[in-house]
Amino acid sequence: MINWGALGAVSLVSLAAGAVIVVLLALALVGLSAREPVLAADVAESADGAEPVGKATGPVMSAAAGTALAGLCLLAVAAIVVYGLALIIFHH
């Protein structure tokens, strides 16, 4: 007999963990992108001289803050993965 309640709980936890991992990896990439310098050629000029919309004119955070954010996010992802593997390996 299938325990539908347990199957539903495992499915929801797996879906939530997958979403959290994706968000953490995206934040790590944002943090790492703060280390990339913005070149003058990367900034678009508009025809009427207005400020371009949707084009970054510089990093949102410092390189050190971006690196720290990326490191923390990647450590959190590693911790989630290790915890999940430990649950699978050492389940009684």
Image: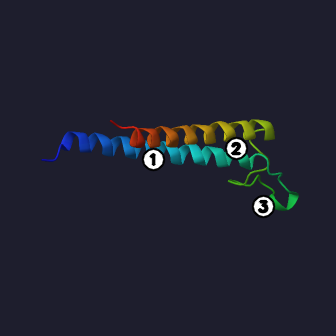
Q: How many labels does the image show?
A: 3
Residue 27 in the image, given as x and y percentages of width and height: 62, 44
Give coordinates of residue 8: x percent, y percent.
26, 43
* Residue named by callout 2: 31
> Which residue is label 1 attached to?
18
Q: Are there few (<14), some (14-19), or many (20+) residues within 10 Å of tag 2?
A: many
- Residue topped by disc 3: 46
In this rendering, position of residue 37 left or right of residue 10: right
Q: Residue 80: give x, y in percent of width and height.
A: 51, 39
Q: Earlier in the sequence, mark 1 or mark 2?
A: 1
- What amino acid type should be assigned to the residue bearing mark 1? Gly
Residue 35 horizontal side relative to residue 84, left or right: right
In the visual, does 50 lie left or right of 25? Answer: right
The amino acid pointed to by label 2 is: Gly
Picture coordinates of residue 59, whole percent (x, y): 77, 45
Which mark is in front, 2 or 3? 2
| Element assignment for label 1 | helix
Q: Which residue is drawn at 81% across and 60% down?
A: 42
Which residue type carries mark 3?
Ser
Q: Which residue is drawn at 65% across and 36% down?
A: 72
Are the two marked residues, 1 and 3, in contact with CB atoms closer than 8 angstroms?
no
Instruction: Describe the element under mark 2 as helix, strand or loop.
Output: helix
Q: Nearer the viewer, residue 72 or 60?
A: 72
Q: Are marks 1 and 2 in contact (CB under 8 Å)?
A: no
Report, in whole angstroms, how far the alpha carbon at label 2 lies from the one at label 3.
28 Å
Residue 74 to residue 51: above or below: above
